[in-house]
Every structure is written in structure tokens, then in C-alpha cells.
Image (cartoon, helix red, strand yellow):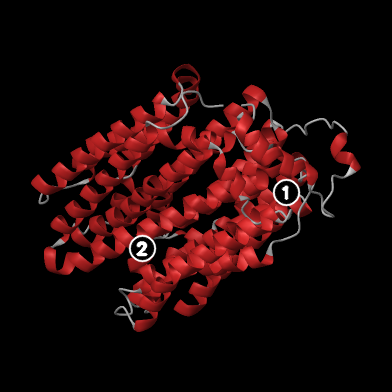
Amino acid sequence: MTSQVTPASRANVLPRVTRLGTAGAPSPASHTARPTPRLSALGLFTVLLGAFLPMLDFFIVNVALPTIDRDLVAGPATLELFVAGYGIAYAVLLVLGGRLGDLFGRRRLFIAGSLAFGLASLACGLAPTALTLVAARVAQGAAAALMLPQALATIQSATEGERKARAMGIYGAVGGISVVIGQVVGGVLLSANLFGTGWRFIFLVNVPVALVAAVLALRSVPETRSANPAKVDLPGTALLAATLLSLLVPLMEGRAVGWAWWTWTLLAAFPFLAAAFVTVERRAEAAGAIPLIPLSLLRIDGLRTGLTMAVPFFMGFGGFMLVMAVALQQGLHEGPIASGMAMVPMAVGFFAASLAGPRLLTRYGSKVILTGTVVQAVGLAVLTVTVLTDWSGLSPLVLLPGMAIAGTGQGLVMPPLIRLVLSEIPPARAGVGGGILATTQQSSLALGVATLGTLFLSLSPSWGMRDALTLVLALQLALTVLVVALSTRLPRRVG
């Protein structure tokens, strides 16, 4: 996949990038053509492994929450903080992680992030108390934010042409599969109770995998960085963190703490913090600096539309995964394995569609994404009707048709959408572009957990599990219809 930038976007983006070095002028090296570092098959496997782990761990804990609650006497507020801590730390630091990779070298940050992720996972697995587990989980999310942007930026910078297109397609497939497989693997590991570790093994298993990723990166991943690395944008970083925290923390913790006054105060501050962030970033770019998020990138139509689509798409996805895990275990009293296995048809449909996606994208362009969103909407409609009409007989087998259809649709949307968002970002800003995409994705997943998850947990005691689940599925269907409408505005061809 070659990086394509429209003439208008080239005028808005590339001149700013090439004229700005660390001292505000182009470095002599920027005028010298350099060969593109080549990412080998083993190197691609390594960075994909690093991308797989953080996404897997975002959802692997869903099926383990009841067990953790009993073992550590956590309580609902601490459990929600345990889920929220990882997602918030992950989302807040992703753009910074991408910028640090541009500055210090992506392989170096990938290795550091892998080792830190392994250590944080070990701390999670050994946590003696609920609060210790929360702290370790936050550290795990921060380490993931160092690791994930480097994977995406390395693919952008160290592949070209058809190899880049294939690598991006695989990356998108891995991202989606890891989310679905997370709950399947979590259920299997929890039920297996390997070495008598119970829920702890879902974290301890990360330690050797993260170590292998770090060792393989030393041997197989080329070092890449921005030709004109910029200094860390401290005001922008602080304001982005404050903006995301002011939205995600009260939404995730509000129900558990009875919507205390501070939750409403943070929500009221959110629009002002967001406006301040945009103002600071715009002024920094106008002054010739390179902000944390160059807003000029958002002038690229395909990038802007793709990111706009990503918000409702991943919101629905994140809320769906949590709500289904809770409904199956607490509403239908299914065990962890049955709860996880209910996701298998979705994973199979997603994987099959994502394998076919790159060829279909080459032939039909963005029509593939439009088709995928329609297929996903059909799957959600089938699931909604199934839950509403057959709650007493609901089982993983009864859910299979709707799950398979929805997963197939998601597989036709997610990898091409990721490819679209990144296709027009200049290689010099690959780390920033990867950070923007990953932050949008993770923030939207967390927002879906916070909004749809909180709504479900709030209504299920009074409405009952069936009606609460039906409402959430209907809301996700509405979000998918919005994605269908937005997908009609995509460029016909995807680079």
C-alpha cells in the first residue's frame, strides 16, 4: 500500500513536516534519499505479536471479573476501576507513545514497552489485594501505550507497495481477532486453573510472550524513526490526558460511586478541556512547532471520515463484548468456557472476512466497508430478535447465527478501515498517525464500555437481563446504522 496524499493535503501536511527539524529547519539528511528499511516476515510477526497482546488484555478479563471479585473481595466500584484503569492509561498515553517512537526509535520503544508490559503483567498475576491489582493494571495499560504505536508505525515505515497493503490487512485482522479471542482465551484459562493459579494465569501467561516479543525484536525488527523528530509537546500531552480523563473516569466510575458531585464536575469540564487542547495544538502548529496531534492531518478527507467512523464502530464493539460476557455469566449462569465459546462464531466470521478483505478492497474499494457495515447491522438485528424472543432457551448455539453474521460484517469493516485511516499519512508522521488511530480506537472502546456497559448494569436489576440486553443491542444497531451512513462518504479507492 503506497502512501497517498491528495494535492490539498500535501500542501497542508508535507511542507510543514519537511521544513521542521528539531531546530525549526530541515536537517541536511532530509534531502538525501534513504532506502526504506525492510521488515522481514519474522519482523512482521514480532510487531503483530506486540499489537496482539494489548488488545487481547483489554477484554481477556471480562470473563474473570466474578472470580476476581470473590477472591479479592473487590466490590463493584473497584472492579469497574480495575477495568477502567487499563483502558484509560492505554488511551491517554497512546499518542505520546507514538511521538516517543518517532523521537527515540520505534524498535527501542517497542522493546521497552514489551518488557514493561511483561513486568506489569507479572505484578497483576501476583497482586495480593484489589487495589494493588488496580495499580498494576494501570501500569500494564501505560506499557501497552508504549508498545502498540511502534508496531503500526514500523509497518508504515518499513514496508512498501503490496507488502504494506498485506501487512496492514493482517494488522487489522489481528486487532479484531484479539478482541474477540480475548474472552475465549480468558474463559479457557480461567476454567483450566493451570497450576492452581485461577484467574492469575490470564496475566502470568503474558510474561513469557512479552519476553519473546522483546527478544525477537532485537533480531528481526529494523530501527526506524522520524527524519525530523520533534520534541515532546508537554502542554498538548497534559491537556489531552486531562480531556480524556475528564470524560472516561466519571463515565466508568459514576454508577459505582452513586454519581458523586465530582463525576458531574469532571463531565462539565470536558468540553472546556477539549476546546483548550484544540486551541493549544492549533496555535503550536501555526507557530511552526510540531504539536502532539497535528490538526492539519485532519484536513485529509479520507483520514477525517475514517476516524469519525471509528468512534461509533468501536464504541458499539467495546460495549457489546462486556455486556455479552456479563449477560451470559450472570443472566444465564453460563460458565467461563461457555461464555467465551459464545464468541467463537464471531471470531470465525471475522477471521474469514478479514482474510478476504484485502482482495475485495483492491477490486471494489470502499464498497467493501459499506457492505461490511450493512452485514454487521443484519447480524445485530438477528441477535436482538433472538434475545427478545428466546431468552429462556438462549445458549451459545442459539446465538451462533447472529454472532457469525455480525463477526463477518466486522471483519469486512475493521481491517479496511484501519488501512484507509493510515493510507494517506506521510511516513515521517507514521508514529503520530498510529497514535491518533490507536487513541481513537481505545478511547472509543472504553467509551462503549462506559456508556453501554453502565446503562446495562444500571437497568438490569429493574428491567431484567433480557430487556436490558435487548436495549443495548438495539443501541449498538443504531450506532452501526450511523457507520453505514458515514461509510457512503469514504473515498472510492483506498490506498
Q: Amino acid at mark 1?
A: Arg
Q: Which quadrant holds the C terminus?
A: top right
| SS of the residue under disc 2 | helix
Left or right for 255, reference 442: left
Residue at screen point 57% across, 61% down: 279
Residue 155 position within the rendered picture, expressed as x and y whole percent measured from the top left:
65, 37
The reply to whether dot 1 and dot 2 touch (C-beta < 8 Å) is no
Residue that extends furthest to the bottom in the rendered view of this protein: 261
Left or right for 21, reference 169: right
Q: Quadrant location of residue 14?
A: top right
Left or right for 279, reference 356: right
Q: Observer-nearest residue: 89 or 330?
A: 89
Q: Observer-nearest residue: 207 or 194?
A: 207
Q: Observer-nearest residue: 33 or 224?
A: 33
Residue at screen point 34% across, 74% down: 254
Q: Quadrant location of residue 17?
A: top right
Left or right for 275, reference 38: left
Identify the residue position indicated by label 2 in the image.
Answer: 450
How far apart marks 1 and 2 lie (CA) works out to 32 Å
**Is residue 195 shown to the viewer in this render?**
yes
Q: Which quadrant holds the N terminus?
A: top right
Residue at screen point 45% across, 42% down: 176
Residue at screen point 88% across, 33% down: 32
Residue 66 position within the rendered picture, expressed as x and y whole percent measured from the top left:
32, 67
Looking at the rendered structure, which numbered label has been put on residue 106?
A: 1
